[in-house]
Image (spheres, rainbow, N blue to C red):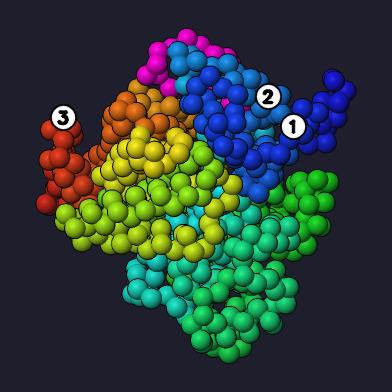
Amino acid sequence: MAPEFAEELRLYGHIYMYRFCPDIEMRAYPIGEYPCKTKSAAAIMLMIMNNLDPSVAQFPQELVTYGGNGQVFSNWAQFWLVMQYLSEMTEEQTLVMYSGHPLGLFPSHQRSPRLVITNGMVIPNYSSRDEYEKMFALGVTMYGQMTAGSYCYIGPQGIVHGTVLTVLNAGRRYLRAEDLSGKVFVTSGLGGMSGAQAKAAVIAGCVGIIAEVDEAALLKRHKQGWLMEISNNLDHCIARLREARKNKIALSLDAHGNVLERLVHELDTTGELLVDLGSDQTSCHNPFNGGYYPVQLSFEEGKQLLSSNPGKFRTLVQESLKRHVAAINKLADKGMFFWDYGNAFLLEAQRAGADVTKKGANKTEFRYPSYVQHIMGDIFSLGFGPFRWVCTSGDPRDLATTDSIAMAVLEDSIRQGVSTSVKQQYHDNIRWIREAGRHSLVVGSQARILYSDQKGRVSIAVAINRAISEGKIKAPVVLSRDHHDVSGTDSPFRETSNIYDGSAFCADMAVQNFVGDAFRGATWVALHNGGGVGWGEVINGGFGLVLDGSKEAEERAKMMLSWDVSNGVARRCWSGNAFAYETICQAMTENSSLRVTLPHQVLDENILEQALKL
């Protein structure tokens, strides 16, 4: 096998061990079909196979689920080893994973996690992109993105909901509009997570124009029904945009071309600004290895250059980023509102020399805000984040039952009385569940995502667990969340970009969350370097928790989910966020065992300046 693997290393820069690629239909089978000794192990198997399902995964042959390079495992031999270990695992063993490598089954007790995952844990001084390339080639580390390497991805539905909320709240903040009909949202990317943008635009009610260079990606989204129309002709694209805008028709249209510079041309020649909101979801965390393709070349030409002359490819990408930003700046100067989607777009544009600098700002701020700074940050501070669940029966009727349970929980909470800001989020999420059923959002496992706060998550989990116990749901349900959450991620250019007390580059929150989830009841936990904005830029973690209808599962859910939210709210409170202060104080009144160190507001902002003069 040595010559074969050496050839893979030469051709691909990594040994994938393709000879071990399974000759089976890779998908999430009903939990009862997995040959395991425990339901927990079977649930993990189901989640792994869902992450590698070709209808879900971006590059399944390379074990990449999403984000261009977010892997489940580093090679196919690891897949087989993990599945073997899971088939043998008892409730008194824990499987330990080192960056895709199954270290083995180790004795533990029943309340321990059945699986502990770490991905990309590198000594800080060696956590550079160049060092990553070397270690990845050696097969000793791996980029797990977020939910790729933690086995918790649920297809692009996960980012659809977040994008819907982002677009709705962007409309409220920038356009002062609750109704986005007739408003135009222009962005890039239809690949992995970015594939959600087309569907999100339609659910939000606006006109979505999405640029994508990879024809395979846009055809995949069109076939799935997530993208309504494809256009290779920019004249036709602009005509459809104008028509949908005028008639206030919700539309998702792929512009297979240079749409931003064409919009600048329309502005220059007609004086008409045709776009209201703008963003980008290309994989700019990995811009020089296929995450972003230069405008100067066709997609096929770009792929050839990347293979033959990566240095030249890098130069063209940086030139393209500067052109990209120049077009954004022209449109923004006339009234388009642009935000960074946390994909390192502005960070890489700045490194390329583009005009994105914000005068007098700290190094986490640019000319345009991240969506966390202006849109989602306060939602996180209220304790809301991307909670999700997977029905392991594989039966759509079970998912429909959980949808009804979740809506009933939120509606009951509103009746009991919540703050105005919380009520708006609950209403958005009730609308989301109703729309989700109509828009065929399930790709892969029977899963649902719902932005919820601590009270909502715990209440939904308890209600679902009781429904399992009563036979209303036929099989266990896996609870999880995106790492992109209230407490799960320390990322100064995204999740913690609205932390202004100097601690945005500290990773205590994410690490503490991983540890705290582990001993409060999680079935499995994961901690990653990288995710979203890229290697060395973020530490993040996640979990899986199996509800089986037992009283013990209910207690685990109450304890773990409460910590999983309160940790991040407390940190955001200490940094000075008023919403987080209000939220954590409310949590303390509801739980006498919770005691959090609270900050005291400084009324005189000149105190520090005066003290430093002494």
Answer above or below: position of 253 versus 51: below
The stretch of residues the image draws in magenta is 96-113
Quadrant of the rendering where the C terminus is positioned = top left
| Residue 88 in picture, x, y percent from top left | 58, 16
- Tell me the element at label 3: loop
Furthest residue toward top: 107
Would you say residue 489 is visible in this rendering?
Answer: no
Disc 2 target residue: 80
Quadrant of the rendering where the N terminus is positioned = top right
Answer above or below: position of 60 versus 3: below
Disc 1 target residue: 22
x 52%, y 45%: residue? 395
Residue 384 horizontal side relative to residue 180, left or right: left
Disc 3 target residue: 593
Furthest residue toward bottom: 270
| Residue 598 in picture, x, y percent from top left | 16, 39
x 68%, y 71%: residue? 230
| Residue 114 in picture, x, y percent from top left | 47, 21
